[in-house]
Image (spheres, helix red, strand yellow):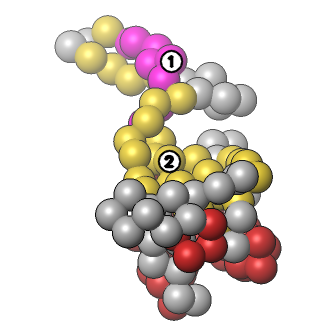
Amino acid sequence: MFKVEIITRPEKLNILKDALAQKGIKGMTVSNVMGAGNQKGKTEVYRGSEMTIDLLPKIRVEIIAKETLVNNIIDIAKKTLNTGNTGDGKILLYPLENVIRIRTEQEGIDAI
């Protein structure tokens, strides 16, 4: 089992969610986060003064999946999120030892 974490632009969420749902992947957790990488923030005008905003809004999509689905999730994310511009995001993979569903106390693959 793996946790796939995708950090990307907020406007890409619906595109990613729809593409994953078409492949039968519906379970995910989505969080609003702030961050900056190579793009180093952006400048905006506020009350006539130019200001640098260091952190940009991003979303974090977390998916727990069987090892057999991980490559499908990665391929879908790369195809739907790539614009070729700085700030498209990152895909992070974490191996999981165990997953426990609280309500039923199922463990492992059954808990997904």
Main SS of residues in magenta: strand
Residue 93 seen: no
Q: Which mark is residue 46?
A: none
Residue 43 seen: yes
| Label 2 SS | strand
Position of residue 51 in the picture relative to residue 108 (left or right): left
Residue highlighted by disc 1: 54
Q: Which amino acid, by three-letter code, is at mark 2? A: Arg
**Nearer the observer, 57 or 40:** 57
Quarter of the image where the N terminus is located = bottom right
Position of residue 29 in the picture relative to residue 71 (left or right): left
Instruction: Return the x and y of residue 101 as percentages of the image width and height.
Output: 44, 62
Q: Identify the residue shown where x is 44% and y is 63%.
A: 105
Check the image and report above or below for 56 versus 20. Answer: above
**Nearer the observer, 98 or 60:** 98
Instruction: Return the x and y of residue 15 as percentages of the image width and height.
Output: 47, 73
In the displayed orientation, state which residue is furthest to the left: 47
Q: Identify the residue shown where x is 53% and y is 88%.
A: 24
Whether the residues at callouts 1 and 2 have beta carbons within 8 Å, the answer is no
Mark 1: few, some, or many residues within 10 Å (few <14, many ≥20)?
some
Check the image and report above or below for 65 versus 44. Answer: below
First to last magenta residue range? 50-57
Q: Which mark is residue 60?
A: 2
Q: Is residue 54 magenta?
A: yes
Q: Is residue 19 magenta?
A: no
Position of residue 59 in the picture relative to residue 73 (left or right): left
